[in-house]
Amino acid sequence: MATQIVNENSAAVESVDVLIVGAGISGIGMAVHLRNKCPGKSFAIVERRDDIGGTWNLFQYPGIRSDSDMHTLGFSFEPWTEQKSIADGPSIIKYLHRIKAKHDLEKHIHFGHKVLSASWSSEDARWTVTAEKSDGSHATLYANFVYMGAGYYDYDNPYDAQIEGLQNFKGDVVHPQFWPKDLDYTGKKVVIIGSGATAVTMVPVLAEKASHVTMLQRTPTWYASAPSKDWFANSLRKILPNKWAYKLTRWKNVKMQDLTFRTARDNPQKVIDKLEKPMKELLGDKYVKEDYTPPYGPWEQRLCLVPDGDMFKAIAAGTADLKTGHIDTVTESGIKLKSGETLDADIIVTATGLKLAVAGKVAFEVDGKPVHWPDHYYYKGCMFSDIPNLAVVFGYLNASWTLKADIVSEFTCRLLNHMDATSTRIANPVLDKELEQEQLFDFSSGYIQRSISELPRNSTAMPWKLNQNYLFDKPVLLEDPVDDGVLRFYGPNSQQGVGDSEQELEAAE
């Protein structure tokens, strides 16, 4: 089937079997899995920017790097072969471009297309998707199945922490999500507000040129210092083919991530002792327990990775420091804390966090009814109750994003092949009973808690659940039967809509 996106009001609008939204890690991964496992399916990728990469294309702040090792942030089908396991943004983009070229994906990608809406018709068994092009015109595409790889946060609007007096500041105020390419911080005093992964990444890099960098935090964060190079992986590649070395390293890292997370929950003090040891060694007399001991246990929020202890080394050298305190107000020349201390600044970086967005902020509707996400439950962590022919990627908070993206892609391919084998066109996770609800995320991170009311629901058990456990999810998505009695399938003549009663569904079958 041909792939073509045309301007609306055109007489001929062709369709695709699968529409992938987003050309970042999730979208590129799905495209490769489709080519390998569903070679007969036509597909298109729509991407709002002018290049692939998603987050790695958007974020351009100094030092941008992965917060996970590339043996799990990389794809299952494409070995990571660089020396550094903790990779910078340009290296990740290069990796994605290599995959794009290797699998001939360029011709399937439509850049400059921001998806605005997606409307499902049960009668036609397809989605009608509208996108805004870079020139302001609109384009329409029909798709039998939609795969959302648009990430999990708002690309347009970062979280606004409402910092008192920020408008008074006479210097530069920048947010990492929109870092100016021409910003010169050489010899400047920089204050970074925030203590998450972005702030931790920037501190040592900015400290190389700035006169001084201060990271200002309201509360401390747990930091994990680890080598940027994986000696295990680099050693294996000397004696094994890249494919096998990568596979073994990936397995090792998955197991270690799982062990660390479970230990943090079962025996937090053991993990705390392990995290504190390198901090104390690298910081020396700059280590102040109150500044590095959060009021929560490790992995109650995501651990911040400090590769090679770079941030601690900058603080120990005196080119950077860390302050714990609450902002009273921002003045013309810096920040006044409630303690009375003043931090002079030429540049203020507001690394205050992200804002979550469900399914890329696309306006979804099913048979004319707008989708209100809190009314729907997750199905196997990748579909939603009573929304047909739609899959979405929401990566792990306690492990690499790509681990989830890989298995969701493979499950979607299994689903598509099952539909072909059974001559069905609609796959709908039908919710026909009341469920006991459970908190969606067992994490106290601010960006999670701020958005929890806008997110889909979570139940206590599969299949109506979004897990944070790759080792549990993998067999569920890759081995359990696709036709599990919950996911309902309908043939080409079915016109069942969302919300049909159980009796009507059984009659239709």
Image (cartoon, grey):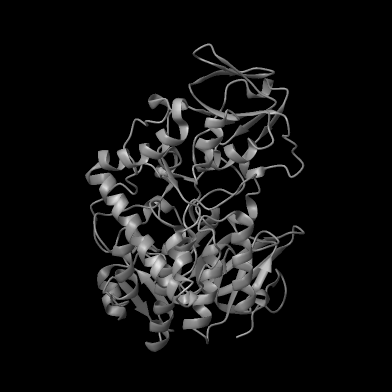
Residue at 24 percent of width and 58 percent of height: 461
Residue at 26 percent of width and 74 percent of height: 485
Residue at 48 percent of width and 71 percent of height: 237
Judged left or right of residue 151, residue 434 is: left
Q: Position of residue 377 (x, y in %)?
A: 34, 57
Residue 50, located in which quarter of the rendered image?
bottom right
**Residue 202 visible to the viewer:** yes
Judged left or right of residue 115, residue 316 is: left
Residue closer to the observer: 289 or 467: 289
The N terminus: image quadrant: bottom right
192 to 249, vertically: above or below: above
Q: Position of residue 4 (x, y in %)?
A: 67, 77
Residue at 58 percent of width and 28 percent of height: 318
**Residue 405 visible to the viewer:** no
Residue closer to the observer: 146 or 242: 242
The C terminus: image quadrant: bottom left
Residue 95, located in which quarter of the rendered image?
bottom right
